[in-house]
Amino acid sequence: MIPLGRPQEILLPVPTGLIAVTVLGALLVNLIPLPAPAIEMRPDFCALVLVYWGIHQPRRVGFTMAFLLGLAMDLVDAGLFGQHALTYVAMLFAAIVLHRRVLNFSLVGQSLHILPLLFAGDLIAVAVRLLAGYELPTPTHMVGSLVGALLWIPLCVLFRLPRLPKAGIDRV
Amino acid sequence: MEASPPPFFKRGPSPAFRLGVFALLAIVLMVLDARFGYLEPVRQAVSVILYPLQQVAAAPGAVLGRISGYFTSLTTLQHENAELRTHTLKQAAALHGLEALKRENTELRSLLDAKPQVAPDSVLAEVLYAARDPFSRKFIVDKGLNDDIQAGVAVVDSEGVIGQVTRVYPFVAEVTQITDKDQAVPVQNARSGLRAIVFGNGKEGTLDLRFMTVNADVQVGDILVTSGIDGVYPPGLPVARVTSIDRDGAQPFARVSCAPLGGVDRRGHVLVLTSKRDLPERPAAKESSAAKDKKSTRGGS
């Protein structure tokens, strides 16, 4: 299965530790306290990292991890227990289903795929909350997803770094 | 085109199946949490696991705050110091009067054979972060079960009531602000003595005084203080100021908006009032609703 349009890159295999570290890091970034206006703009880093691994290593990230991560986020957000879990599991599913398609695009094209995915996650959260009797959030809440889609490009570059083949290894 | 994988590549159940299982699990969790509240022990456990992570995440901000605090200019501090001094003087004068009044009050109360009022104990807590949830108005403070904080106690600042502790974990507690949707505070109009309930509406900086009849004795600028009849908030704490009243004769109730007095959204430190008042047992649910009816008719007349 060689992606069309751009040459297949040969990268080092992903150590499980890297996935764990990035997911924990995302959780940590989500936990950083921010003042109120910035909080609305903050993308959900956990969702973004989860989608990244869902697309790049669909066999390596489990739904169990997405689920537990969601529960942790629910606790942090003081929200309904299980809401983030549902969102993350659904987003991971979408990422796994889309992974063959998305990787054929350039980074900009990929981020255009990520945008509706993040929006869909937002929509699930809104739907769940409406069913539970809460009110609609302010529209600025959706800005977070937009920022998240933009962050996809630096995220891809960053996560590729530890997987680049070591210099000189093929010249021996 | 991909053929289905050979049987020796074990892949387990398909993603769709897993999605279904986990989505179902999540929905069950949500229903259990929203409808029955069975999940408190689970929350407590996850909270303990997450606590160190939260501390790590909050550390850079705390360090930055300390650094910026260090560089606060001397003049600002001197200015603040002078201001605080005059403030203390003013309060000391008021306090002398208060001492006399307190003594008088206890004497009168003992004459009347009424229960003495308890001054609430309080714990100073630091606001760790505001919950990221865009649907609710909550924040997390750095004191929890270890500091004798119980769910349900009131949270105040120097200006007035901020909210109520709604969930307690071992090291942190979750405070729901009074502006949260449907968070209710029983209040009394400090001018007219009229009792009412003030509700949050989920918007920043506004509260609704609901179920006030069109001719109720409320004026713009009235201060609402806690009435204390709920047994949660100690009586007499300032809550809100009435900002606008819309008396439309066609509606059964006047639309009264208020602004909270406490710095609901902008405090770094808050006081958690830890002591609960020992009140007589609550009457059964049916009786209490009857009492509520009585109260509202009295308020309307």
Image (spheres, rainbow, N blue to C red):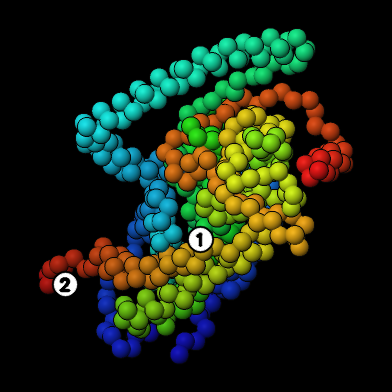
Is residue B168 in sight in this rendering? Answer: no
| Residue toward you, B176 or B188 | B188
Q: Amino acid at mark 2?
A: Asp
- As helix, strand or loop, the secondary structure at mark 1 comes to helix
Chain for disc number 1: A
The number of numbered discs placed on residues in the rendered structure image is: 2
| Residue B82 in the image: above or below residue A14 | above
Residue B249, how many percent across, how many down?
75, 59
| Residue B165 in the image: above or below residue A112 | above
Which residue is pictured at 30% across the width and 25% down the height? B82
| Residue B298 in the image: above or below residue A75 | above
Residue B289, how many percent across, how many down?
84, 42
- As helix, strand or loop, the secondary structure at mark 2 comes to loop
Q: In which quarter of the view is residue B299 placed?
A: top right
Chain for disc number 2: A
Instruction: Please state, as top left, top right, bottom left or bottom right, where the N terminus of chain B lies in the image.
Output: bottom left
Which residue is pictured at 69% across the width and 9% down the height? B107
Question: What label does residue A170 carry, if any?
Answer: 2
| B118 sits left or right of A24 in the view | right
Which residue is pictured at 21% across the width and 68% down the height? A165
Crowd tier of the residue under label 1, counting other residues whose Cα lies within 10 Å: few below 14, some 14–19, many 20 or above: many
Q: Amino acid at mark 1?
A: Ala
Q: Give the CA distance from mark 1 to mark 2.
A: 37 Å
Is residue A106 in sight in this rendering? Answer: yes
| Residue toward you, A83 or B179 | B179
Residue B252, how many percent across, how many down?
77, 57
User: On the image, numbered disc 1 is attached to which residue?
Assistant: A66
Q: Earlier in the sequence, mark 1 or mark 2?
A: 1
Instruction: Please state, as top left, top right, bottom left or bottom right, where the C terminus of chain B lies in the image.
Output: top right
Question: What label does residue B127 carry, if any?
Answer: none
